[in-house]
């Protein structure tokens, strides 16, 4: 499942329009799945991008999931670090501290 999709689809709406909200959540989850699927970019490249973006946005559940998926795809630690450094280069020292904290947890 795409990044953070469990958080998007879990729980009930606080407002009385559960059916409509659930339809919106389902459409967004479909969008995430489509965006994450290989098209012009292969799955390996998109996985590296997911690591970079997870670091840049400091999304802990996303980063943990994408680190796990990268290792399953055969990424080396050097490749994972290189992808993370792309995110760090765009997001600065807070992203670097975040990545160093999460990568070994």
Image (tube, helix red, strand yellow):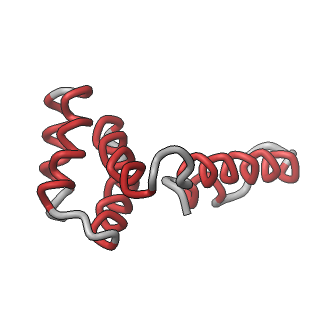
Is residue 58 found left or right of 96 in the rendered image? Answer: right
Query: Residue 29: percent from the left, percent from the top?
Result: 66, 52
Image quarter in which the C terminus is found: bottom left
- Residue 22 versus residue 49 in the image, above or below: below
* Quarter-of-image position of residue 37: bottom right
Q: Residue at x 74, y 49 (%)?
A: 13
Q: Residue at x 36, y 40 (%)?
A: 53
9 or 44, nearer to the observer: 44
Total marks placed = 0
Q: Residue at x 58, y 46 (%)?
A: 35
41 or 30, nearer to the observer: 41
Query: Residue 16: percent from the left, percent from the top?
Result: 86, 46
35 or 5, nearer to the observer: 35
Is residue 48 found left or right of 6 in the rendered image? Answer: left
Query: Residue 48: percent from the left, percent from the top?
Result: 32, 50
* Quarter-of-image position of residue 1: bottom right
| Residue at the outermost front position | 40
Is residue 16 found left or right of 7 in the rendered image? Answer: right
């Amino acid at each position: 499942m795409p990044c953070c999709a469990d958080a998007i689809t879990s729980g009930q709406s606080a407002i009385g329009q559960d059916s409509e909200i659930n339809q919106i959540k389902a459409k967004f989850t479909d969008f995430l799945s489509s965006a994450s699927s290989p098209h012009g970019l292969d799955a390996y490249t998109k996985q590296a991008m997911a690591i970079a973006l997870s670091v840049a946005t400091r999304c802990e559940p996303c980063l943990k999931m994408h680190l796990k998926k990268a290792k399953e795809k055969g990424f080396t630690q050097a490749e994972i670090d290189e992808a993370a450094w792309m995110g760090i280069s765009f997001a600065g020292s807070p992203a670097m501290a975040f990545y160093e904290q999460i990568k070994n947890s």
